Each structure stands twice: as C-alpha cells, then as structure tokens.
Image (spheres, coloured by chain):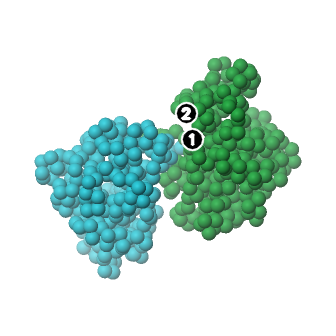
Chain colours: A green, B cyan
Amino acid sequence: MELAEIYAAFRRIAPYTHRTPLLTSRLLDRLLGKRLLLKAEHLQKTGSFKARGALSKALTLKGPKGLLAVSSGNHAQGVAYAAQVLGVKALIVMPEEASPLKKAATRAYGAEVYDRGVTVENRERVAQALLEETGYAFIHPFDDPLVVAGQGTAGLEALAQAARLGVFPEAVLVPVGGGGLIAGVATAVKALSPATLVLGVEPEGADDARQSLERGEIVGLPEAPRTRADGVRTLALGRYTFPILRERVDGILTVSEGAILEAERLLFTRTKQVVEPTGALPLAAVLEHGGGLPQTLALLLSGGNRDFSP
Amino acid sequence: MELAEIYAAFRRIAPYTHRTPLLTSRLLDRLLGKRLLLKAEHLQKTGSFKARGALSKALTLKGPKGLLAVSSGNHAQGVAYAAQVLGVKALIVMPEEASPLKKAATRAYGAEVYDRGVTVENRERVAQALLEETGYAFIHPFDDPLVVAGQGTAGLEALAQAARLGVFPEAVLVPVGGGGLIAGVATAVKALSPATLVLGVEPEGADDARQSLERGEIVGLPEAPRTRADGVRTLALGRYTFPILRERVDGILTVSEGAILEAERLLFTRTKQVVEPTGALPLAAVLEHGGGLPQTLALLLSGGNRDFSP
C-alpha cells in the first residue's frame, strides 16, 4: 500500500462522499487536558467510514452486475450505498439472527438482505454459492487493497484539516477490527507526517491485534468477543492488513467496556454528537491512557449508527 | 424591539458565544421533500440558545455582585455561564423536586443551586427574598428586552448563513415557550427578510401562544402542560414578548407528542445530532404540517440538553 493508491482512491470517491469535518471541543479539551481533533466519520454517507472503502473498490469494477458482501454492520450499508452510486443491485448476506433493525437499515439503502438459513458459521459458504449463482462482485470488508486505500482517505483528510487549523497531531488513534481502517490511515499518516504516532484501539476482550503485533503473527480470537463495540468483533486481522500494521502502527491500546460507555456519554452530552460504541474507542483510550499519551491527538470517530432511545 | 438592539446584543456576546453552524442534510431533505436549514443551537455554549440572552443582559450590568435566576432548565445554565464570563456568582432558584441531573448540570457550570423549601408555587417569592438579601441582579428567562435581543442574534446569524449558502428561507420555524426566542428571531427576520414567514411551534397540549394570538390577549395555561418538550412548559407569554409576537409572528403550528418523538429520532439517526425534545419542535411541525408549508425552511434547533441512555 502506497500513498499514491490512497490519493487515487480519494479522486474516485470524492464525488460521492463527504469531506467530514474535523471537530474540536474546548469543553472536552479542558475536561481531559488534551487538544483533541475529532474526525467525524459518523457524519459520513451511511453513517460510517465504510462508505469510503466500499466505493473505492466498487468504482474500479468494470460493469459489475451487482455487489455482494457479508456483513451485519456498517459495511453492509457502505456496499449498499456503493451499489446505489453504480446503479446496480446489492446483495448482503447476514445471519438470520442478526438484528431486525440492522436488516431494515440495510434494506433502506436499497440492498437485498439474504438471510434464509444463514448462520455465523455458514455465511462465507453461502456467499460463495451466491457469487457463483449471481455473477456479482464481492466486496471484502477490510482485506483488499482497494478497500484499505478507500479507508485511508479519512486519514488523508484529517491531516489536511489539522494542517489548515495550524495544529500538528502528535498521535492518531484509530479503532481496530479487521485492520482496514488503520492500515489505510497509517499509510497516509506515515507518508505525510512520519513523526505522528499511529495507535490502534481495541476493547480489552477483543485484543487480537495487540496480541498479533506482539507475537509477530496473526492471532485469532477463539470466538466473537463480547463488547459494546460491535464494529470490532472481527476474529482476526487480514492477511493483507496485518503486514501493513506491523510496519506502520506504533502500538495498540486496549480499553474497558466502562471507558467505552463513558466516552460515548461524553461525546453525547458534551459535543451533542451521536457516535456508536466503536467510534468512541479512541476517546475511551484517552480516558484510560491519557497520562501516557501526547498532548495533541486526532481521534477517528469511525461511525454513528446506533439506535435512538427516547 | 428594533433590529439595532439585536446588532448591539450580537456585538456584546460574540466573544463568548459560538457562531453555531447552519446544518443541511440531503438525507432529511429527500425524506421530507423540503430544503431544510438547521440552525444548530444545540452546539451553542451551554447546549442551548439561552446562553445568548443571559449574556446579552448580563454584559450590560454595571459591576453586579452576582446573577440570580429562577429556572430548572437551560436558562439556569445560560445564567451560570454568563456569571462565569463576568467572574461573579450565580444563584439559581429551583424547586426541590427538580431532577438531580439538572441541579448537577447547573452546578457543573459553577452556579449555586438554591432549592431548600422551594416549590413551583413559591419560587418567585423565594427569588424576590434572595434578591433583596444578596443584592444580585435578576435575569428573566424571556420577558426582558435585553434577553430578547440576545436570543434574536440566533436569527441574525441564521439569515446571514442562509445568504452565504445562496438560499432564501421562505419560513423560519421556532419553538415557543415564553416567547423570548421567537420575539428576537422575528424582529431580526422581519427587518432583514420581510418576505420570510415566522412561525412558532408549540406542543398540542401547551398551545397558549396559539390561543393568545387568536384572542388578541395573553391566555395562560391552567397548569404546567405535560409534554416531552420541557423547554416550553411556560404557562404564558410575557407582557413584553406578546406584543412583539402579535406584530411579527405569522402563525403558530401545534404538534403531537408522537411527532416530537419522531423528529428527535430523525435528527438522531439521520443527522447524528443530539437535539432535545424542545429543539425538535420545528422538525415535528414539518412532519405534521409539511404539505402546507413552503419549500425552503429554516428550523431553529433550540438546544441539545438531554440525558444519555446507553
């Protein structure tokens, strides 16, 4: 993965994505004793950065009949939106037991949800059979250079926006699931601002990236971890993303469930922004590890898709 | 109330308030078939427009010993913030049975909460006694020209921001409680953009402004109305605000509790913004009366102070 690939992805997706704002909050800064730059991907199309990667890949396909993905989360909506942009169908494979709300949200973006007989165990096989049957193009949620390049555009934008504010981010904090977002962001940051640290953030119970970087090989979790941060329940880093993380990520911080909840609450009550638990991971890391972190931090708020409660 | 008074208020408060953004959402526009401009007062200092009016008044006082207000809502925080700016004490009279969360929020802004023996019935008398005892200056939540002028700056900004977008707002929709906000906004709008309608929005069960404008005299509610929109539970318009509404407000729309809830949900899930029920009143009016309303609407999202639920 080279910087040029991220620039190329940016040129592809720019007409269909938001340049999301880099928010600041004097209230949060004072409360936490830091200078925080919040990259607001909860305000991205489809409510998360996933629209970037899905579009980046989809826009390189030559006349696809449709797009197919396996996801019960934000990637489903990213792919559904990419299909809308291309004017083709989207078919999303989701376990039958996935939440009806998530199915509805995916359908609301015009995708077809395929869930008949689908379980967490058989979903990859079901997808393979559907790919052969339909001739649709598969969009992986993270382990694909074109997807990673798309996610990296969030980092590209954040650096440019920080520069415009006249602020140098000493570290960038990024949620880690399969590693697509942090691989892209780290590529942009290490090329354009090599002195900036790139730190991943995982829930304590889902620390496979931390273990993998420590051991120098991909360590998978035995089963889907229990965490509020449902965007990072991925079992392991990808074969494509892992080497990028080894080369370009400076460390992984883990956070408790309590810190995630408190970070969500702070974003909600202080900045009035709706950020999902996964998107609150970087702020949770500031709450738990703030003392050991540099002063000026860019936090990647990855998404904002959570339910409304009156 | 003249436009010049609003400009003067703007000059006073500008160093201590945010020029809150005028947000747009293509998703909401498509969903509702309108062009909506959302004046984001939930992103104002203290989380509501009340900081404007409190500061506008407080900054005209000559060396006050402290500020005193009667409020269990956003006005309390506005006055607490104004006192911070002036470097004096704030004393807020609140019924004992007011929510502990609201008391804590007011104290968090450095104010003292006075609630010993205070009830909804005796709070004005308690305040009067405290004023004499302390020599503090009283800040009324709405029935004061300097407060109204401060609230009007939100309208001034919204018009300037709409012009910068190249958009002409055919109507401005504003929540109505005591009438301070809409009196100020209507003064700005009718002076600068006379062809723009100014419409108030009230919950169905709290339609005293609608009745008052119909009858041509102030009609009070017999008791505090039950509504999600706790910012407009005021029993009646003020003696100062009522004549301004008569002269400058084109109509009052009422909305159901269901529409308020749905408007909050839309703002939360589609724009990822935390807006309190009162702040959602203008969007609720679009949901219930959209067909009869013009195409391009500025909505005053008055505040965002609501509790977080995980």
Picture mark count? 2
Q: Is residue B121 left or right of residue B79?
A: left
Residue A130 is tagged as none
Looking at the rendered structure, the kind of residue marked 1 is Thr
Looking at the rendered structure, the kind of residue marked 2 is Tyr
Residue at image location 52% in from the left, 39% down from the top: A307
Label 2 residue SS: loop
**Residue farthest to the front?**
A63
> Within 10 angstroms of label 2, few (less than 14), some, or many (20 or more) residues?
some
Which corner quadrant of the image does residue A199 belong to? Answer: bottom right
Relative to B196, say whether B191 is above or below. below
Residue at image location 57% in from the left, 49% down from the top: A18
Relative to B268, say whether B60 is above or below. below
Q: A170 or B139, which lies in front?
A: A170
Residue A109 is tagged as 2
Q: A139 or A9, which lies in front?
A: A9
Whether the residues at callouts 1 and 2 have beta carbons within 8 Å, the answer is yes
Q: Which residue is mark 1?
A: A46
Which corner quadrant of the image does residue A197 belong to? Answer: bottom right
**Residue A12 visible:** yes
Q: B28 or A207, which lies in front?
A: B28
* Image spot of residue B220 (x, y percent): 18, 50
